[in-house]
Image (cartoon, grey):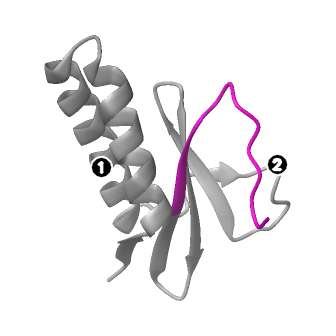
Amino acid sequence: MNIVKWSAQALADLEAIKNYISHDSPNYANIFVSKIITKGDNLAIFPKSGREVPEADLEFVKEVFEGNYRIVYSYESNIINIITIHHGAKELKLFE
């Protein structure tokens, strides 16, 4: 059984996304964040469903998308670590 772990950074990203969207629609913010969480949790079933992250150039760092957001995660030894949730229009800097 695979286990999904959310990093502190990913949880902070979710909070920031929720706060940003809440300015226009608190209801939609909750719905959208729920979609991201569901997508991340589904990685326990389909851990290899993502594509490799071009900026990382590492086979075990992958990403899936929800709307304009990239859910970046690593997958090793049945552990899925969600690293960050990142808007696709912004530059992604990993491992700095």
Question: For residue 54, which numbered disc appears in the image?
Answer: 2
Instruction: Tell me the residue at 41%/54% (across/down).
Output: 12
Q: Range of the magenta residues? A: 83-96
x, y percent for residue 32 = 28, 30
In the image, 68 versus 48, the foreground residue is: 68
Type of residue at label 1?
Answer: Ile
Query: Quarter-wise, where is residue 83 in the image?
Result: bottom right
x, y percent for residue 11 = 38, 57
Q: Secondary structure at mark 1?
A: helix
Residue lying farthest top? Answer: 24
Question: For residue 6, which numbered disc appears in the image?
Answer: none
Query: Quarter-wise, where is residue 59 in the image?
Result: bottom right
Q: Answer yes or no: is residue 75 visible.
A: yes
Q: CA distance from mark 2 to mark 1?
A: 23 Å
Type of residue at label 2?
Answer: Pro
Residue under label 1: 37
Answer few, some or many: residues within 10 Å of disc 2's Cα (few below 14, many 20 plus, some between 14 and 19).
Answer: few
